[in-house]
Image (cartoon, helix red, strand yellow):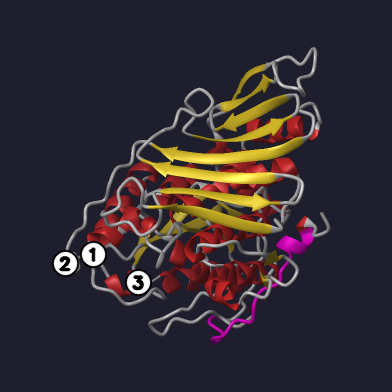
Amino acid sequence: MSTSRRNFIRDAGLTASGIAVLPNVMSSCVSANDKVVVALIGCNGMGFNDLTAFLKQPGVVCAALCDVDSNVLNKRAAEVEKMTGKRPDLYEDFRKVIERKDIDAVIVGTPDHWHCLPMIYACQSGKDVYCEKPLGRTIEECNLMVKAARKYNRVVQVGQWQRSDPHWQNAVEYVHSGKLGRVRSARAWSYVGWKGSIPVQPDAPVPAGVNYDMWLGPAPKRPFNINRFHFTFRWYWDYAGGLMTDWGVHLLDYALFGMNQYVPKSVMASGGKYAFPTDAMQTPDTMMAIYDFGDFNIVWDHTIGIYGQNYGGRGHGVAFIGEYGTLVVDRNGWEVLPETKSTSAKEGMKPVPLQPGTGQGLDLHVKNFLECMKSRQKPNCDIEIGAHIARIASLGNIAYRLGRQVNWDGDKQSFKNDPEADKLILANYQNSWKLPTL
């Protein structure tokens, strides 16, 4: 394949419109002996899990929490005080956090549509960033975020913590060793059996303590609806991309890493609301996407409401299907299942029993970020990795939403002769919020 990974993940951002937002106040690097002062923006769900992992590390101090829901904010402040003995300062507007010169790094744990601006503003003010995945909601945002991190020379770790869990890396090394023979199909899947339907709910008054206008931010103005708020935001196109950008960025990342090719020739997808056709979700509860690389395919497959019993009951995972055997990896570990009856079966090919994971991926990921803040080296999931896989997931969603095959030009960061698809690259900010000019 002619298009390299470098060409795909390089900074080739589309022209951004808007105004400059914050001055470039470059902070000095954190020395090896200094404490690290962090702030959390977006305190519900995974954001607080991230902060908890930070506070396990020696020398980390939480100075501030920020959330548009004061109910969440006060709850988390009490929890941090219990963990550390000190109550952090509380904010509703993330810009007030970023203005503080005593903060070394921010954790962005907001809904997806709010990842871009805090991350860029933090880089401009000289702070390093740990940003939850997916890096951005749109390809335009991802390109601009890469540009900001490089322009301001910041360390950015994206929360795809499997990049720091050794058993995933060991699985890829086995695939790269050639022991599976030629791999012409890789599959990544997430079958979410625990999740059911989201019943349709009427619009309602904004709950007390919630700054809903700030929660919407650059997303379209809409009446408050509980289904679009907190965890379930991810099932609406205004804010996220469903399971494809939730689990897909974790698993497709390793499918690409294992195959060591990164830019598909074309993408097609199909699916829909097959399980719960009348419920409140917009994103598909059942979907398959096929990424064609010319001499192999990567297939993404997700369902909601069933586990699927893939490879012995794995609700999620990546499988590399080779001539001599199949390597299967998930968060619990990896193993190899030999081909025994096929025309390509290799005599003497032996199974590899389950090689268990550490169960410490998030802690190791945070530790790696903190080390890189001091060394100024690229972390395990540097912004270019996070941006590239967020784009790949977006390609699958764009193919699904258009209902047809799309062809991506990794060098130009646009679709090939497809203005209809190109429109879905853009961020389209509203409510007076604009992408910054870099």
Q: Is residue 332 magenta?
A: no
Numbered label attached to residue 204: 2
Circles 2, 1 touching at the beta carbon (< 8 Å)? yes
The residue mark sitting in front, 3 or 1, is 1
* Gap in angstroms between the C-alphas marked 2 and 1: 6 Å
Q: 240 or 91, which lies in front?
A: 240
Q: Is residue 19 magenta?
A: yes
- Outermost residue on the front side: it is 343
Q: 23 or 379, which lies in front?
A: 379
Q: Where is residue 215 in the image (x, y as percent from the top left)?
A: 34, 69
Q: Position of residue 366 (x, y in %)?
A: 57, 45
Q: Name the residue under label 3.
A: 216
- Say if 1 sits above or below 11 in the image: above
| Mark sitting earlier along the chain (2/1) | 2
What residue is rendered at 33% in x and 45% in y?
275
Q: Mark 1 points at which residue?
A: 225
